[in-house]
Amino acid sequence: RRPWDAALVALAPTVILAATVNWDLLPLAFAGCCLLLWSRSRPLAAGVLLGLAIAAKFYPLFFIGAFLVLTLRTGRWRAFVLLLIGTAASWLAVNIPFMVANFEGWSFFYRFSQERGEDFGSIWFAASQLGLGSIPADALNSIASGLFLLLCVGIGILALTTKRRPRLAPLLFLIVAAFAVTNKVYSPQYVLWLVPLAALARPRWRDFIIWQAGEVVYFVSIWWFLVGYGVTDTKGMTPQWYAVATLVHVAFTLWFAGLLVRDMMQPDRDPVRTDGFDEDADDPGGGVFDKAPDVFTLRRPRG
């Protein structure tokens, strides 16, 4: 019903720039198919695709948090359980052969992620480049994970206290964005995780392009910075300016997230619910959540 919304993804500057940096388009495709199947009320099949997405990249695991919160609010537990079954089955089917054949190699990614310190694109690396000091890797794991968990709790509370149930896509964007801005690294292709979620969450060209502008600033800056990283007498970007570019990306992402929070609290500002769909549009991509009544909220009853 809104065919031009797809152009937000296809023509996104960061998709054009970052699509071939790594293999993130593969998990992106799996995750997109998961959301498509969920929107058609096929939770088991959606779970199978979600498991494949998680097997290809870690970040789709956080989708489960959004599904859980909306399940709490709507009581659609059967669909949620089917989603989990499909997710676990496909993830195990892909991973068990590698775990059995070479557990050391299979687990390397998880060990590396745990042991790595602050890295490019993170607020932690930016702080060190600005002379604010570095945090040891062990402590940084706890701090970054704790901050992400705190943001997720806040997102969950928001979703359970708004007057009207939030749509699925904005919750997904908020959770993945929370991970992106608190993680120990932000590789240039990570923006691809957020692009389709942003298009689904708030299909407004002006807002989308403003956010993309901040991401393009970061994309250009990371490569300019790497030109001179660890090398003397080069014309690469200085560490201080690279830190500023990192903070620009974070600020623009938080700004877009703020728009989604406002949409949740003021549903009449949500373009999906107020423009281009049926008059009683609720959550066209929500599957079993669409038009579902609330069975649990944290809102205090009036009176």
Image (tube, rainbow, N blue to C red):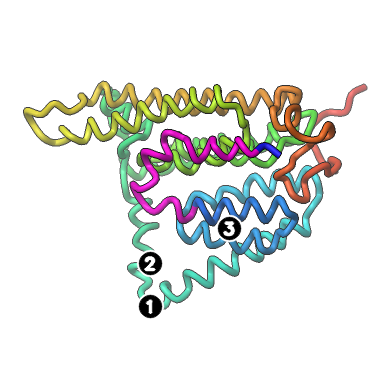
Circle 3 is placed at which residue position?
50
Q: What is the C-alpha distance between the residues marked 3 and 2?
A: 20 Å
| Camera-nearest residue between 28 and 64 | 28
Count of numbered circles on the image: 3
What residue is shown with label 2?
A: 106
Is label 3 in a helix, a strand or a loop?
Answer: helix
- Residue at numbered disc 1: 101
Q: Which range of residues does the magenta coloring cover?
A: 3-27
Tell me which numbered mark, 2 or 1, is placed earlier along the sequence.
Answer: 1
Taking 145 as reference, is 209 above or below it? Answer: above
Observer-nearest of 82 and 189: 189
At x 27%, y 21%, the residue is: 241
Horizontal side, residue 261 vs residue 194: left or right: right
Query: Looking at the image, can residue 289 be seen?
Result: yes
Magenta-span inclusion, residue 34: no
In the image, what residue occupies the spot 69% across and 28% down?
A: 271
